[in-house]
Amino acid sequence: MRNLFNLDVLAQQAPQLPAQPQVGNAPIPGQPVPATGTGTPAAPVTFARGQPVGFFTDTTVCIGCKACEVACKEWNQLPAELDPQHFRLSGNSYDNTMELSGTSLRHVKFIEQFDLADPNRVGGRWLMMSDVCKHCVQAGCLEVCPTGAITRTEFDTVYIQQDVCNGCRYCVAGCPFGVISMNEQGVAGKCTFCYDRLQAGLTPACAQACPTASIQFGPISQLQQRADARLQQLQQAGHTQARLYGRDEAILGGLNSFYLLEDTPATFGLPEAPHLPSRNLPASGGLGVVAAVLAGIASMVAFRKRRMDPGEPASVGAPVSPGPSSRVDSAEARPDAT
Amino acid sequence: MPPDFNPSYQIPNWGWWIVLYFFIGGLTGGVYFAAAWLDLFGDLNDRPAMRLGHLLAFPLIIVSAALLVVDLGQPLRFWHMIFQSERFPELILKPYSPMSLGSAILALFGLVSFLSFADALFAHGGLLHKPGNPLGKVFSAIGALAGLALAGYTGVLLGVSNEPVWGNSPWISALFLFSGLSTGIAVLLLLARVPRTTFEKLSEADNYLMLFELITLIVFLVTLGALGTRFIFATPTLILFAVVIIVGLLLPLAIHWRPKLVGGMRTASILASLLVLIGGFVLRWAVLAAPQGIGL
């Protein structure tokens, strides 16, 4: 069973949305929504509020065209990478941005496996993968965010409210996939799953633009069936290394953006066993408590001792008076002064 | 068994403001903890040191909070840590987020330390913390717990993450707690004009805490296994940890053990306290630098 992590807490924190009248083709809450485009060869996608949706990315058909990157930038009006840290070309790859960032919410990874010593480059291969926030069912970023800026939407996606985030960057440290970075506004940025488009019944821009149906969008249950069929097809064709990553609950309760890989997750720069940051909370907090008890006992032992060597000076330390009150304190504190 | 290493991570760029906050915040918790413990378990001779602790803790926590605010990407939204921005003045507290818990600890500590500060400043410690006042004892107990939490929560915060080293060791909380208390006591030893009995009590407590810190630091480094080699031992961060161990722990312990080697007791106390403070600062730098780089 898919577990919506912290759902109760989030439900209490989430603002109650007023009932919205239907405008134009806007969807009616709770009703199936026809999508205007799918970008996939499958049947048109319909989804409803409250229904988990996601991406199934079939990396075996990605051609590295970066249409998804461009569509994401255009729809979300994201600037070019002007940060000197990111404004660069790799120089040795067709992979330009090299990683996701606060303003590059999609990134097509180029995994180029060639023997550079071979002038004919025979036997090499090019793996490509359109990377994005995984919208984890158990999301580390959502878990650690102290402000409640990161929420789970009615579509089961993970969304950062830009006007609530204060830029503490804990989500950056909490994400097991290294997805989140700061944007130019000083707040955390990552894939929004085109929340605005979902509300209007539209397919996210990246999936809409993908020409090969590498990025497929739809209700999670449908995507899982499609992924299972595709995996079976590949394995029957002899691709024994093909596997699904994040399709089921084994990885963080399931990833709402899951992948078909034709090699190990490490080959694609994905962690084999990502985990929630809170897995460390019992041990780290427990050791902190033990240390506090130990320190308290040791200090108590030290502070309860009463020693006064008459041969030694009555006071030591810097010649800083503790203040006017030392009149009382000094009289109390220094038996030899009374 | 070496801990798992997360290959895909982004560093949060917690730089010098956070190094300073971790240092001053821990020290502040230690100052109030020592003052409270002197109130609870000390005698009348210890009251000047207690009062100095109360005078220092509140201003220091204000400095700590200011450092945190300055570090935010949107500093004017600092209050989002405590209040729900959409439903002000409803509070927000997320039990799985050490940063959220830490914000609550800061707020509680700020309140307690303010009342103790006001008592020390305006009533010369003769009202709330008057000798024998049970309310003052309760206050000291609450403040001591808040001080301990303040000194240690930053280590939990780092542990509850997916960053290499931080997320691979549960020992940072204990390490920061011992260090915070030790540096807090060092501040009192450095600034307070105290009777010899109080001095000996504080020095002895500091020795215990430094020993605990040394053991914890060694366990922390050893249990990192191969990850320690990759992120600490084969990097310039190793120098920082060496400074912590030699300058911040072994030397002060040696000075406390044989004060006559560096002159009189007063000189030894000042020198040892300064070294402890340097060690406390460098420890925060070293731990934050492990996955982020020594230049932060």
Image (cartoon, rainbow, N blue to C red):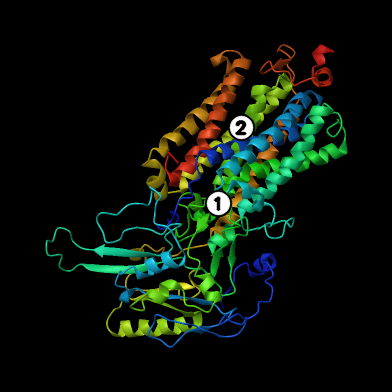
Label 1: chain? A
Residue found farthest to the left: A119
What residue is disc 1 on? A167
Mark 1, Cα crowd under 10 Å, few <14 / some 14-19 / many 20+, is many
Label 2: chain? B
- Check if mark 2 and mark 1 are on a common chain: no
Q: Residue at x 75, y 19 (%)?
A: A308
Q: Looking at this view, is B257 or A217 the one in front?
A: A217
Percent across and percent down for residue B2 are 43, 54
Mark 2, Cα crowd under 10 Å, few <14 / some 14-19 / many 20+, is many
- Front of the two marks 2 and 1: 1
On residue B183, the disc is 2
Look at the picture and state if B196 lies above or below B184: above
Q: Amino acid at mark 1?
A: Gly
Image quadrant where residue B199 sits: top right
* Left or right, residue A284 beside residue B202: left
- Pointer 2 with pointer 1, Cβ within 8 A: no
Q: Looking at this view, is B42 or A153 the one in front?
A: A153
Quarter containing the N terminus of chain B: bottom left
Q: Residue at x 66, y 48 (%)?
A: B103
Q: Residue at x 70, y 67 (%)?
A: A12
* Left or right, residue B51 beside residue A182: right
Look at the picture and state if B255 lies above or below A120: above
Mark 2, secondary structure of its residue: helix
Percent across and percent down for residue A323 are 76, 20
